[in-house]
Amino acid sequence: MEFTIRVWRQAGPGSKGELKVYRANNVSADSSFIEMMTELNIHLLEMGDEPVAFEADCLEGICGTCSMMIDGVAHGPEKGTTTCQLFMRSFKDGATITVEPFRAGAFPVLKDLVVDRSAFDRIVQQGGFISVNTGNAPDGNAVLVPKDQAETSMDAAECIGCGACVASCKNGSAMLFVSAKAAHFANLPQGQAERYRRTILMVEQMDKEGFGACTNQYECEAVCPKEISVNFIGQLNRDYMVGKLKGAGGK
Amino acid sequence: MTLDARIPPGDIKDKWTRFQSEMKLVNPANKRKYSVIVVGAGLAGASAAATLAELGYHVECFVFHDSPRRAHSIAAQGGINAAKNYQNDGDSVWRLFYDTVKGGDFRAREANVYRLAEISTSIIDHCVALGVPFAREYGGTLANRSFGGVQVSRTFYARGQTGQQLLLGAYATLSRQIGLGQVRMHTRSEMTDVVVVDGRARGIVTRNLVTGEISSHRADAVVIATGGYSNVFFLSTNAKGSNTSAIWRAHKRGAYFGNPCYTQIHPTCIPAVGEQQAKLTLMSESLRNDGRIWVPKSKGDKRAASSIPESERDYYLERKYPSFGNLAPRDIASRSAKEVCDDGRGVGPGERGVYLDFRDAIARLGRPVIEERYGNLFDMYAKITGEDPYNTPMRIYPAPHYTMGGLWVDYNLMSTVPGLFVIGEANFSDHGANRLGASALMQGLADGYFILPSTIGNYFASSKLPALGADGEKALASAADESRALFTKLVNIKGKRAVDSYHRELGTLMWDRCGMGRNAPGLNDAIQRIGALREEFWTNVNVPGSSNDLNMSLEYAARVADYFELAELMCMDALHREESCGGHFREESQTPDGEARRDDQQFCYVGAWEYTGKVSASRLHKEPLSFDNVHLVERSYK
C-alpha cells in the first residue's frame, strides 16, 4: 500500500510547529500504524532527515503510551482501538493521512507527536488510591464483593490513561479519565472509606491542571480505546455533590 | 570472590520466619535518614518504592516512561498464583513450592522458592485491600482458574488484564506516597550507570530523556527493578522500550549475571507475518484451559482447518502428555510446537504455526461463556490477524517472552555489589530454567511488597554507611562523565545504517542460535558474528540529532549497544551449559527417543558470570544447588 502522510513537526515545547508531508511506500496491509511510522522514520533517516518523535511501547493496546490524532480522531478511525492496534488495512490504498499529537492545554507538546500527560499522574496522586499500607490486609475473601459490582469496577478500571478522552474533547476535559478512576474504587466495598474525599481531591486537582469542564458531548466515550462509559461521569458528579454536602475532601 | 547465597539455616518451612525474627531493624525515627533509589516502576519497582516509603524511608524512583503506570508488567494477561486453596482442591504452600521447583526443571534455589510460595497468599490479600478488581463468583468470593504445569486451580485474575490491574494497584499506592512527599518520582529519566563507592552501591547516573541532561544521584542503597531482556531477540512479546541497559551497566560495575542463557519461549503467541513487524503479541496461556492444540497429521496439508476431519488431526500435547494435555508447562508446549513445525506440519504463512482450537469448548459451554472468559483476547487476535477465532482456530507459535536469567542475588535479593538490590524479572529469580504461568506477577510483588522492605532494613542496620566524602563525589562525577562520553560518541559516529537494522540482525541471529534449540557449532558461530556486527555498529551506526534533547534514536542506540554485549554473554553461557534444561534444547544432550536430557551430575548449579573488562574474558562462578526437599527427578508430565 502507499500513503501520503502529513505529520506535525515541532522541535520543542516552545517552538512553532507545522505539518510536513511525506510519502510512505511499500506498506504492508498487516502493518500496524506504529510499524508504518517506524518504516517512515527509517526512510527519513536514509534521506538525512530527523525521524518523527512519537511514543508507543507495549504495542498491544494496554500501556496507554501511544497517542496520535489520526485524521482528526484520537487513535484513528477504528472503534475501541489504540494507535498501536490500528492496522493499515483500515485505510484506503493511496490515502492521505494526517497525524497530529494529542492536543490539549493540559498536555503540552514536548516534540513532534510527544506530549506531556503527567497531569494525569498528579490527579491520581491526590486521591486515586485506597490508603492501606502493606501488611494490614485481612484475608482476600473476608470482604465479599458481589460479582456485578466487581464487573462494574473492572469496567472503569480498564482505563489505560492514554488521554484520548481529553484530546478529543473540545473543552479539553479529563472527566472521563477522572470518573473512571473514581468509579473503579467507588464500586468496591474496599473503596467506600475514602469515596467522597477521593472524588473531591481528584476533581480539585483536575481543575488546577487546567482541564476543561464537561458539556456532555460524549466525544470521549466515542474515542476511548477501552470504550469506557460516560455513565461514570454521572456517578462522579453525584459523588462530588454528596461529598461537598458532607464536607469531605479536607486534608 | 565466592558466592554466598546467605540462606538462613533450619527447616525450609521456618527459614523466612526465622530471618524476619532475627533480622536487624532500623528504628522508625531513623528510617527517614536513609535514602533509597528505586529504578523502574513495574510490579516489583512500584510495590517496593511504595512499601519502603510507607516504612518511612526516603525514596527516589526513576523510570524512563512518561508515567510510572506504563511498565510492561501492565501487559501480563492471565493471572497470579497463590496457594490459598480456596477451591478445596488440595492446594498448599508446599504444593506451589513443589510445582515451581519442578516446573523450573530443578535449577532454582529451594529456599527462595519456598518463601515465594509462602508469601503468595499475603499478596492476594494486600491486592484485594488495594482495590484490585479480581474476578468474583456470584457469592462474592474470589474466582480461580488453572494454568499450565499444575493440577490445581490457584490462579487469581482480572479478566485478561491481570497485570494491568495489579500494576495499577501498585501505581495507585505509589502515587499515594508521591502525593505525601515520601517518594520523589523522576519520569523520563533513564538510568545509565550505577555508582560504586568503597565497594558499595551509593548512587546512579541518569539521562533526562527530554533535555538530554546527565546527572548523578546519591543514595544509601540502590534497587534495580527494570525487568527482563527478551528484546535481545528483537521480536519478542516485550514492549519496545523494555531493555537490558540498567542491569547490564550494573553488571559491568561488579554485579554478577546469573544464568543469562535462561530465557522463556512462550508457547501461545500470534505468529510473525512480515518483515516490517515490530513485535510479537502474546495470547494468554489461560486460553489453553479451553483451547485444544493441534496440527494436521500429514505434512504439507494445505486444507482449511474446518475441512480437516477429526481423524486427520494430531492433538499432539494430549497424545504425548495425557495427564497434563494442553496444560503441559510452557517449555514443553513450546518445544513440541517447534518439533511439529520442523516436521513440516506447521500451519499458516511460512508454516510456523499450530492451531489453538475452541470449537469443542464453544460446543460444550456455549459462546457466551467463552466470550466472558476470553473475550478481550479473542478481540485482540481478530484485530491483529483479521480472522475470527470463534469460527476459525487461532494460529499460535512460540515467542521469546520472559528471562529467568538476570543479575545474581542472594536470599536478601542483594547482588554481588553490597547495597545494590535487584528485584522482579531483573534478578535471576526463583524460576530456574523455566517459569510456570502466573508466577511472574507473584514474584514481582513478593519481592517488592514483602521481601525487599525487610531485607533492606537488615542491610542498613548491619552496615556502616558514612556520608560520601571527596572520593564519593569524584566517583559520582566521573560516572556521569563516562555516560556523557557514551552519548557523545554515539551521535558522532554518523554512519550509514539505522539502529533498528542492527537490532533486527542481532535478534534473528540470537533466535536461530540461542533460542529453543542450541548446539556448540551454532553458538560458536554466533559469538563470532555478534563480535563482527558489534564492530560494524560502532563505526557505521546512524544516530541523527544531538545528545542534548529528546532523541529517541539515541536512546535506542545506547540500548542496542548493550544488547550486543549481553548477547555474547548469553551465547557463552549457553555454550558452557552442555545439558538440555527448561525450554532449552541442547541438541547434544538428548535421550534416545529425542527428549531433553538434563545433566544433574555436571550442571546442577547457578552459573554466575563476573565481568572482567571484556565480555569474552568473563569469569564463571558456580553456586551449587542442593535439593533437600524436592528430590531431583526427571520431569514427567506424561
Image (tube, coloured by chain):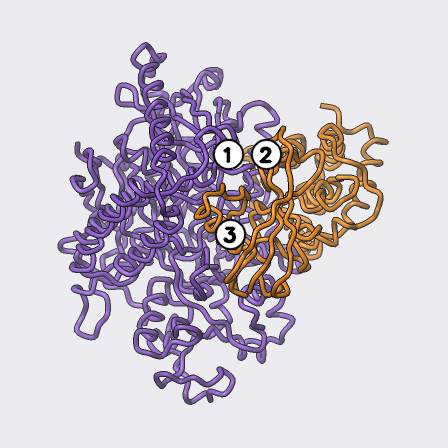
Asked if both marks, 3 and 2, belong to the same chain, the answer given is yes
Q: Secondary structure at mark 3?
A: helix
Q: Secondary structure at mark 2?
A: strand
Q: Say which residue appears at 73% left-offset and 37% top-offset.
A: A195
Nearer to us in this view, A11 or B258: A11
The residue labelled by disc 2 is A110
Report the side of B178 relative to B418 (left or right).
right
Q: Amino acid at mark 3?
A: Leu
- Residue B554 visible to an observer of this rendering: yes
* 2 and 1 marks in contact (CB < 8 Å): yes
- Badges 2 and 1, same chain: no
Residue B150, percent from left and from top: 40, 62
Relative to B289, residue B104 above or below:
above
Residue A164 in the image: above or below residue A244: below
Disc 1 chain ID: B
For image coordinates 44% across by 43% down, the residue present is: B444
Quadrant where the C terminus of chain B sits is bottom left
User: Which residue is nearer to you in this view: B207 or A136?
Assistant: B207
Quadrant location of residue A171? Answer: top right
Q: Which residue is mark 3?
A: A40
Q: Which chain is orange?
A: A
- Please give the chain letter of the residue carrying mark 2: A
